[in-house]
Image: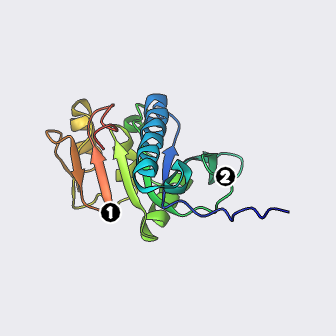
């Protein structure tokens, strides 16, 4: 009887934090982009794409009021997030909640060492966590005034496409996930 090889955890798990209003283009574009990156890395360094990059989608389950994985490119391994990306979100600038399971979960993951990145309107969600306080951030230029009004403790720099602090990263336009 042949032994099956144990499932090794991928080197990088990239989660996409979905919220009401999250851009499908961002969700699936990021999924495709990171899948391709995993395939290229696997070709270069050996192994399979799944052994290099794992992509997961996370969403608040309203019935349980907690964040759960809703899509997993490698479901047999335990989660070990390296990066969480909040895609563009056209509804986020209009909302004002300061507390939600997603905000708590993002803060918790950041405290565990996970890099948090946000794109366009998703930067509003990241700002609501408090992780951008005292830092520069970029978002879509049309959100500049609303962002500055809602988050006076964050220096808005919409002339930059990406601002990278190492532990938090923001990207400007709705398709800036490609630049991220």
Which residue is located at x 48 percent, y 61 percent?
A: 11
Which residue is located at x 26 percent, y 38 percent?
A: 172
Which residue is located at x 69 percent, y 56 percent?
A: 76
Q: Position of residue 102 (x, y in %)?
A: 52, 52
Q: Position of residue 77 (x, y in %)?
A: 64, 60
Give left or right: position of 177 versus 105.
left
Q: Nearer the viewer, residue 180 or 95?
A: 180
Q: Nearer the viewer, residue 175 or 62?
A: 175
Q: Position of residue 116 (x, y in %)?
A: 39, 56
- Dividing the picture into quarters, in which one does residue 168 lie? bottom left
For the residues marked 1 and 2, what is the alpha-carbon distance in whole angstroms? 26 Å
Tags 1 and 2 touching, CB below 8 Å: no
Residue, far right: 1
- Dividing the picture into quarters, in which one does residue 95 lie? top left
Secondary element at image label 1: loop
What residue does disc 1 label?
167
- Dividing the picture into quarters, in which one does residue 149 lie? top left
Secondary element at image label 2: loop
Q: Position of residue 32 (x, y in %)?
A: 47, 36
Q: Is residue 110 visible?
A: yes
Name the quadrant of the C terminus.
Answer: top left
Residue 64 image label: none
What residue does disc 2 label?
75
Give left or right: position of 176 versus 44.
left
Which residue is located at x 48 percent, y 42 percent?
A: 35
Give left or right: position of 5 versus 84.
right
Q: Nearer the viewer, residue 75 or 6?
A: 6
């Amino acid at each position: 009887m042949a032994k099956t090889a144990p499932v090794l955890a991928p080197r990088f798990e990239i989660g996409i934090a979905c919220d009401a209003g999250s851009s499908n283009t961002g969700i699936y574009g990021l999924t495709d982009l990171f899948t391709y990156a995993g395939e290229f890395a696997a070709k270069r360094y050996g192994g399979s794409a799944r052994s290099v990059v794992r992509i997961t989608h996370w969403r608040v389950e309203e019935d349980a009021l907690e964040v759960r994985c809703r899509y997993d490119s490698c479901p047999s391994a335990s989660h070990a997030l390296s990066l969480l990306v909040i895609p563009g979100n056209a509804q986020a600038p209009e909302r004002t909640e300061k507390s939600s399971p997603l905000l708590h979960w993002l803060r918790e993951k950041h405290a565990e060492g996970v890099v948090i990145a946000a794109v366009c309107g998703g930067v509003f969600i990241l700002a609501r966590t408090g992780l951008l306080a005292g830092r520069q951030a970029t978002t879509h230029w049309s959100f500049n005034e609303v962002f500055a009004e809602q988050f006076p403790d964050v220096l808005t720099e919409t002339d930059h496409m990406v601002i990278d602090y190492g532990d938090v990263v923001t990207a400007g336009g709705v398709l800036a996930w490609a630049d991220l």
